[in-house]
Amino acid sequence: MGNAEAPKQNSVKLIGDEFGKRLYNERISRKLSISSLAQKANVTKGYVSRLEHGKAKPSKQMIERIAKILKIKPSPLYVLAGYLPIDIKNILYSFPEEAPNVLRETFDTYVAGNSTTGYEHKKSQASLKTTKPIIISKKEHLYEIFNTDCFAWLDKRASNSIHAVVTDPPYGIKEYTHKEKKKLRSGRGGVWRIPPSFDGCLRSPLPRFTVLSNDDKLKLENFFTKWAIKVFKVLVPGGHVLIATNPLFSHIVYSSIIKAGFEKRGEIIRLVQTLRGGDRPKNAHNEFEDVTVIPRSCWEPWGLFRKPCEGRVQDNLRKWKTGGLRRISKDQPFSDVIKSSPTRSIEREIASHPSLKPQALMRQLVRASLPLGEGIVLDPFMGGGSTIAAACALNYKSIGIESDLEFYKIAVKAIPRLAAIVPNGNGNGSDIWGSIKIIEGQEPLFEQS
């Protein structure tokens, strides 16, 4: 009986030691004495000393209190104190063989001495201003990402060299102009609606598409018509485009893509409830309390288009590896309705992009886009990198383009971390997660080429 208990005791002590080392390093780096930290945390000096020597395990409330004092995120301290995040628990349950490596990587990420600001890229931030790709420093070279304009990149790209496009573009063009992005980042709103906090939770900003004028809509049509023509050139015959849009103007985006020569193959409906819509008349909500200006949004349309095949679908599949969508299994086809929760907070912490889509959704869409699991997936409006991370998790090759430097910087750090997340499988494709490749080592594998 005594022998059976020994490994557990050693494990607890190891976790305590690493938590103590991290706490000590953080305290020293801020030139705090044990007395001053104890006073701020409203505990005794002896308790802080026991924490640093691995002789006491802090409660979650104490971790939050210490993290607030040290001005760091509590997540690393949770891990080092032995509180496993829900994602790691899911890995233990769903991936018993891979779990030891994932746990080791997770634990090593947060040990004492690592940067308190998260995963830091090896190169300086100045190097990010180039348009050279960031690639995995392994033989697979799974993906490339570029900080450049997608129109210019598409012009230079060889014809028939991309096998699928999965993207969430700037819906109304206007919201991602320099002027509106500046307002967004300063918290002033503009075209962006900054929702109030609710129950202590901060809500993500949403663009107000109802403010678009007829001129804005004409610009939107011209934008997507020119874009679709360029995409048509680089896609191989039978290649699909999956593009997120909005019920208010999906018709504009869709007609523009059809003008370029694409076949409309359907629409993927993402069932998700957001804060969009459902509002009463502005500045008259008390007078018209029973009136809603626009329905509360409970779904999101993704347009599905295909470049015409060369001959029969079977011929196109043999030659170009495209022409259809990958089935979920032999018995279950990919369907056009996907139940999807809003993007989880853990993903938003990794990639603070206002339009970040969840991995649980993106991996289903990206997986379906390559019918034989072969080829290159392109996201010309990469944003925070969710599409590229999904492709990486599925072991698909991909290319991401992002013109905004700040969003590009987010994607550089976020992609390997998003790719390592095990999403909660639900709805269409809930049984495909067993094929997900956990990215080993994460950010240290990436270097500027």
Image (cartoon, rainbow, N blue to C red):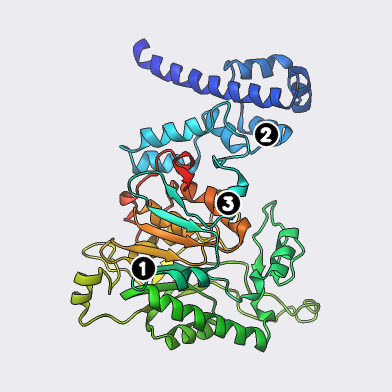
Q: Amino acid at mark 3?
A: Leu
Q: Residue 426's quadrant in the figure?
A: bottom left
Q: Residue at x 43, y 38 (%)?
A: 441
Q: Is residue 299 left or right of residue 172?
A: left
Q: Residue at x 60, y 25 (%)?
A: 22
Q: Residue 20's quadrant in the figure?
A: top right
Image marks 1 and 2: residues in contact by CB distance under 8 Å: no
Query: x, y (%) of residue 11?
Result: 45, 21
**Position of the N terminus by quadrant:** top left
Q: Nearer the viewer, residue 31 or 327?
A: 31
Q: Name which of mark 2 and mark 3 comes first in the sequence.
A: 2
Q: Amino acid at mark 1?
A: Ile
Name the residue that disc number 1 marks.
162
Q: Are there few (<14), some (14-19), or many (20+) residues within 10 Å of tag 3? A: many
Q: Amino acid at mark 2?
A: Ala
Name the residue that disc number 3 marks.
128
